[in-house]
């Protein structure tokens, strides 16, 4: 028997090892979002990010001069806009006070820089140089001046990994600002799409798409892009709407983490409600 | 001399950093060359199939943790890539397999397998047009990686290539 086993191992050891390693990999897929995996992930990318951050600083240095010039011009422009907005803000505060509304727009944004990036056709992540020490937590939305960039996926002490919208594991509830119709935004076939949109929906090309207030992932309304075209019109009862994002994901360098996570209280209430109906 | 099997692991760290910092500047439409695959295939050809399968598994695991992809998806892809590359690890033919043209063709073949398996396990979406996805992502990405592999293999001195 042992001779047979020895002979079997000698002849098929490559295949046996391959099968064994594939089984382990398949098992690990099921552990992807477990807290232990997140901890190990944070340690690995945290250590790599320290080196990435230094290299990224060197690369960035070349661009700083040109960037400064551009920022000076933007500053002047923003100063003019700010004076106008101040007037409007005073008016809004007055109206809010008179209606007794809570102010939910004041967030202490955490500014960060992208130090490395990983992208392929189905998943894109970027690493930013803010982590737990700066108050960053898993699930916080990440934005830049143009709109939503993504969601914090993993955090170490000084760095965090952001799943950008170009990631097929991120589904987001969005709505059309004009019609108020909701849908689920997903990265699919190399474009951002609102999937399973009923044909009765009135969303048209050029409509602004923003995060819906119903979203359980991003609890604030942030712009995402504009509806560009309808697809898959002939088959089925649903359409897909291709959305052109405002954010140019290839050029994202500086981002802001919005220090807010979707309300656990609301989620618990909803789960309790579901349990009651079961 | 007997610790030469550790060299790919030492090289993996600078290659990972290059992949995360410099390679994004060379990418277009999310398509970028895979330096880790080049490293894996190179050392598999120089060693043997079992070695390739095991380092593929380890490289994949580290990539999944560092890049934030689904844990296990790159692992499976790179394990199978190492296994397939192992078929080109014959001691008698190593000189011919490590010539730029042959090496880039091996990279192209392994790249197609690597990208297809990774896409399958990372997206779980069978409703998409598989052929168009294969054409746009897998093949173009493999061609890009195999082109870069020519530059890599020609930049290594011959003396070191076969030592």
Image: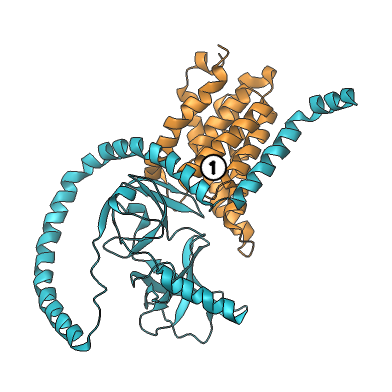
Q: Position of residue A55 (x, y in %)?
A: 31, 36
Quadrant of the image containing the C terminus of chain A: bottom right
Q: Which chain is orange?
A: B
Q: Which chain is cyan?
A: A
Q: Position of residue B147 (x, y in %)?
A: 50, 36
- The chain under label 1 reads B
Can residue A196 be seen by looking at this rendering?
no
In the figure, is residue A233 to the left or right of A219?
right
Q: Position of residue A259 (x, y in %)?
A: 31, 61
In the figure, is residue B40 to the left or right of A69?
right
Residue bearing the label numbered 1: B143
Q: Is residue A46 depicted above or below A112 in this figure?
A: above
Q: Position of residue B95 (x, y in %)?
A: 61, 19
Identity of the residue drawn at 54% across and 22% down: B6
Quadrant of the image containing the N terminus of chain A: top right
Point out the residue furthest to the top here.
Answer: B1
In the figure, is residue A200 to the left or right of A88?
right
Element under disc 1: helix
Identity of the residue drawn at 67% across and 35% down: B84
Identity of the residue drawn at 40% across and 75% down: A212
- B158 or B122: nearer the viewer: B122
């Amino acid at each position: 028997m042992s001779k047979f086993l020895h002979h079997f191992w000698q002849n098929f050891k490559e295949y046996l090892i391959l099968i064994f390693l594939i089984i382990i990999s398949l098992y690990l897929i099921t552990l992807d979002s477990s807290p232990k995996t997140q901890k190990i992930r944070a340690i690995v990318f945290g250590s790599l990010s320290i080196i990435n951050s230094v290299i990224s600083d060197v690369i960035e240095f070349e661009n700083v001069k040109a960037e400064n010039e551009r920022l000076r011009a933007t500053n002047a422009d923003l100063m003019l806009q700010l004076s106008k907005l101040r007037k409007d803000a005073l008016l809004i505060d007055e109206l809010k006070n008179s209606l007794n509304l809570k102010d939910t727009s004041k967030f202490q944004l955490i500014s960060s820089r992208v130090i490395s990036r990983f992208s392929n056709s189905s998943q894109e992540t970027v690493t930013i140089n803010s982590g737990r020490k700066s108050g960053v937590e898993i699930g916080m939305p990440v934005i830049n001046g143009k709109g939503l960039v993504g969601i914090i996926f993993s955090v170490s002490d000084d760095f965090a990994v952001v799943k950008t919208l170009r990631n097929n594991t991120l589904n987001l509830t969005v709505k059309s600002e004009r019609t108020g119709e909701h849908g689920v935004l997903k990265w699919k076939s190399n474009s951002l799409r609102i999937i399973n949109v009923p044909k009765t929906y009135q969303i048209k090309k050029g409509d602004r798409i923003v995060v819906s207030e119903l979203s359980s992932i991003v609890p604030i309304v942030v712009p995402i892009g504009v509806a560009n075209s309808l697809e898959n019109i002939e088959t089925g009862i649903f359409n897909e709407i291709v959305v052109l994002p405002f954010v140019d994901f290839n050029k994202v360098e500086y981002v802001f983490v919005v220090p807010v996570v979707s309300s656990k209280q609301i989620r618990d209430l909803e789960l309790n409600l579901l349990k009651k109906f079961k | 001399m007997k610790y030469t099997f550790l060299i790919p692991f030492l090289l993996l760290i600078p290659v990972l950093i290059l992949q995360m910092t410099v390679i994004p500047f060379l990418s277009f439409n999310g398509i970028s060359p895979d330096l880790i695959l080049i490293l894996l295939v190179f050392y598999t050809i120089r060693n043997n199939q079992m070695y390739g399968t095991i380092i593929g598994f380890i490289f994949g695991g580290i990539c999944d943790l560092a890049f934030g992809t689904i844990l296990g998806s790159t692992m499976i892809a790179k394990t199978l890539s190492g296994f397939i590359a192992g078929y080109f690890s014959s001691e008698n033919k190593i000189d011919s397999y490590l010539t730029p043209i042959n090496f880039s063709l091996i990279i192209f073949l392994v790249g197609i397998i690597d990208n297809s398996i990774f896409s399958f396990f990372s997206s779980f979406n069978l409703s998409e047009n598989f052929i168009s996805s294969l054409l746009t992502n897998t093949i173009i990405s493999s061609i890009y990686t195999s082109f870069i592999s020519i530059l890599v293999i020609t930049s290594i001195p011959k003396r070191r290539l076969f030592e």
